[in-house]
Image (cartoon, rainbow, N blue to C red):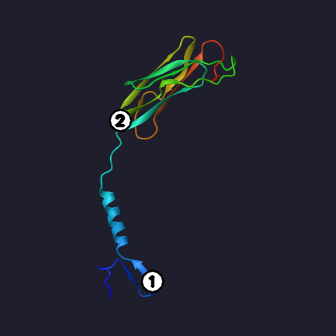
Amino acid sequence: MVRSEEHPMRKNRTGVWRATGVVTALATAAAIASVAPAQAQTTAQLSAYVSDGWGGGTITSQPAGINCHQEAWDPYASNDPQPNPTGTCTASFEIGTTVTFTATPDTGSYVNDGPTPNPVTVHTGYNYTWVMFCPTEGLCSAG
């Protein structure tokens, strides 16, 4: 008869083979992994969104990192879609950093709402702010 310490498989009373060392090895590996320190996340992404108010402007952050510009757009002037924002609209900041925003409208536009929230304290997970620029003459999609 082979003892279980000498052979990783053995027959039980019903004659079925079973693993004796595999479960112990897996349990040991899981215990070691749970004790190993996890690396803490030190930075997180923060995004600035410019809503489709049809006006133009720039949102910037302090500390620097966000510098996102939306060009004014007249949906009735052509069949072209609204242009995408340009510049840096998403940046990494240290977790715990308080970031403040400034919204500056282009000539012919105004800040209808935002930046909201302002300021933002960066945390793990989803971080954002948004702003809406509207044209000083004509319609604004916000009403």
Mark 1 — residue? 16
What amino acid is labelled 2 in the image? Gly
Residue 54 rendering spot, x and y as whole percentages: 61, 20
Tell me residue 50's x, y (percent): 54, 25
The location of residue 21, given as percent across then percent down, is: 34, 74
From the viewer's perspective, is the residue at label 1 or at label 2 nearer?
A: 1
Query: Residue 74: x percent and y percent?
Result: 65, 18
User: Can you identify the residue that label 2 sits on?
Assistant: 96
Q: Is residue 17 left or right of residue 110?
A: left
Element type at mark 1: loop
| Image point (32%, 47%), residue name | 39
**Which numbered disc, 1 or 2, marks the residue that appears first in the sequence?**
1
- Foreground residue, 22 or 97? 22
Which circle marks residue 81 in the picture? none
Residue 46 against residue 68 in the figure, above or below: below
**Residue 61 is drawn in which quadrant?**
top left
Q: Is disc 2 surrounded by few (<14), some (14 to 19) or many (20+) residues within 10 Å?
A: some
Which corner quadrant holds the N terminus?
A: bottom left
Tag 2 secondary structure: loop
**Quadrant housing residue 120:** top left
